[in-house]
Image: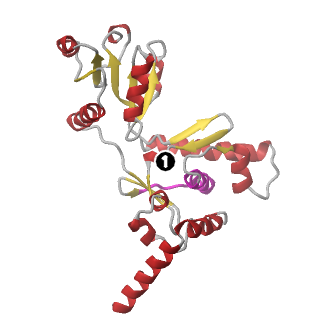
C-alpha cells in the first residue's frame, strides 16, 4: 500500500491527516526523533511534514515533500525550502487528497494494483500478473490471512489450521516462521506492503487489496454473480466459509443463480 510519512508537531494535526489518508493510503506517523531510521527502513513514497520541523530532520532528497503550516504567508517559505506541495491547517479532506494524487501523477508514483481471487482457487494478481508461490504453506498462510479480513491470526491459530496433525512444538513453529518470512520476502520483492507482522501474530491490511470475497461482503452484485459456491477449494478449511457465505447472501444467492440459469437456457 502507498506509504506516506506524516511528521507533525501537534498530535491533533497528526490524527487529522491520518484519518484523511488511511482509506486510500498507509500513513506512517513519525516524530523528528525516529524519522531518519523510519525513512530508511520503510517504503515511504511521500512525506508530509510540519514547516516548523523540516529544518531539524534529514529527509532524503529523492522523496517529494509536502509542507504544512497555519498561515498562508508561509507558502513562499515552504516552496523556497524545496517543497513540492503545501497544505494549510485546518486540513480539508478534498485538498489533502487532491494534493497527494497530483504529486503521485507528477512524480509518476504508481500504487500497484493487488487483486485477490478467493472464489474457486486462491490467487493473487499484481498489476495483472499472477504472484508465484514456490512455498505452498506460505500461500496457504496468506490465504488464511485474507480469509480473516484483517483480523489478527496468532501463530498457534495458524499452525492449528495449516499443520493440524502436527504437534505444537519448536519444529512446527519454525515451519510457520519460514512461511511467514517467505510471504514478507515475496511481497517486498514486488514492492507490496499489506502484511502486518507482530510478535506471535500477523494480519493483512484489507483496504490494500481488491478481493472478490470482500466485495461480496459489501453485497456487490458483480461479486455475488461471480460466486459459484466454491471458495479457496485447495484448502479444506475453506468449506466452512462457503456455508457462511451462503447464509450471508440468503435469498440474494438464489436470485442470482436463477438469473444465471435463465441466461443459459436463453442461449
In front here: 152 or 234?
152
- Horizontal and vertical percent for residue 105? 22, 38
Rendered position, 170 above or below 128: above
Residue 259 lies within the magenta run: no
Q: Residues within 10 Å of mark 1 (few under 14, many from 20)?
A: some
Left or right: 213 as drawn, with respect to 17: right
Residue found at x 61% / y 52%: 141
Give the quarter of the figure containing the N terminus: top left
In front here: 267 or 14?
14
Question: Is residue 40 something that shows in the picture?
Answer: no
Residue found at x 30% / y 13%: 51
In front here: 144 or 215?
215
- Horizontal and vertical percent for residue 120? 52, 69
Q: Main secondary structure of the magenta part?
A: helix
Indicate the quadrant where residue 89 lies. Answer: top left
- Horizontal and vertical percent for residue 3? 40, 33
Indicate the quadrant where residue 24 lies. Answer: top left
Q: Secondary structure at mark 1?
A: helix
- Horizontal and vertical percent for residue 91? 31, 25
Question: Is residue 215 something that shows in the picture?
Answer: yes
**Residues in magenta?**
130-147
- Name the residue carrying label 1: 206
Residue 143 lies within the magenta run: yes
Give the quarter of the figure containing the C terminus: bottom left
Amino acid at each position: 500500500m502507498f506509504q506516506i510519512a506524516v511528521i507533525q508537531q501537534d498530535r491533533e494535526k497528526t490524527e487529522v491527516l491520518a484519518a484523511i489518508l488511511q482509506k486510500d493510503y498507509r500513513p506512517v506517523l513519525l516524530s523528528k526523533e525516529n524519522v531518519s531510521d523510519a525513512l530508511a527502513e520503510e517504503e515511504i513514497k511521500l512525506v508530509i511534514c510540519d514547516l516548523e520541523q523540516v529544518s531539524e530532520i534529514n529527509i532524503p532528497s529523492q522523496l517529494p515533500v509536502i509542507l504544512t503550516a497555519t498561515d498562508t504567508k508561509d507558502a513562499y517559505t515552504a516552496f523556497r525550502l524545496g517543497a513540492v506541495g503545501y497544505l494549510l491547517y485546518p486540513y480539508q479532506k478534498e485538498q489533502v487528497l487532491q494534493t497527494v494524487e497530483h504529486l503521485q501523477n507528477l512524480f509518476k508514483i504508481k500504487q500497484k494494483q493487488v487483486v485477490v481471487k478467493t472464489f474457486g482457487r486462491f490467487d493473487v494478481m499484481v498489476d495483472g500478473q499472477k504472484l508465484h508461490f514456490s512455498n505452498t504453506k506460505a500461500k496457504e498462510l496468506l490465504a488464511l490471512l485474507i480469509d480473516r479480513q484483517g483480523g489478527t491470526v496468532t501463530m498457534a491459530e495458524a499452525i492449528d489450521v495449516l499443520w493440524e496433525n502436527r504437534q505444537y512444538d519448536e519444529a512446527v513453529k519454525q515451519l510457520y516462521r519460514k512461511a511467514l518470512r517467505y510471504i514478507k520476502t515475496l511481497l517486498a520483492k514486488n514492492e507490496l506492503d499489506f502484511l502486518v507482522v507482530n510478535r506471535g501474530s500477523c494480519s493483512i491490511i484489507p483496504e490494500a487489496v481488491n478481493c472478490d470475497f470482500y466485495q461480496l461482503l459489501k453485497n456487490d452484485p458483480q461479486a455475488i454473480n461471480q460466486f459459484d459456491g466454491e471458495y479457496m477449494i485447495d484448502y479444506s478449511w475453506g468449506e466452512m466459509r462457503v456455508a457462511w457465505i451462503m447464509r450471508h447472501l440468503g435469498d440474494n444467492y438464489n436470485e442470482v443463480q436463477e438469473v444465471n440459469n435463465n441466461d443459459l437456457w436463453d442461449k
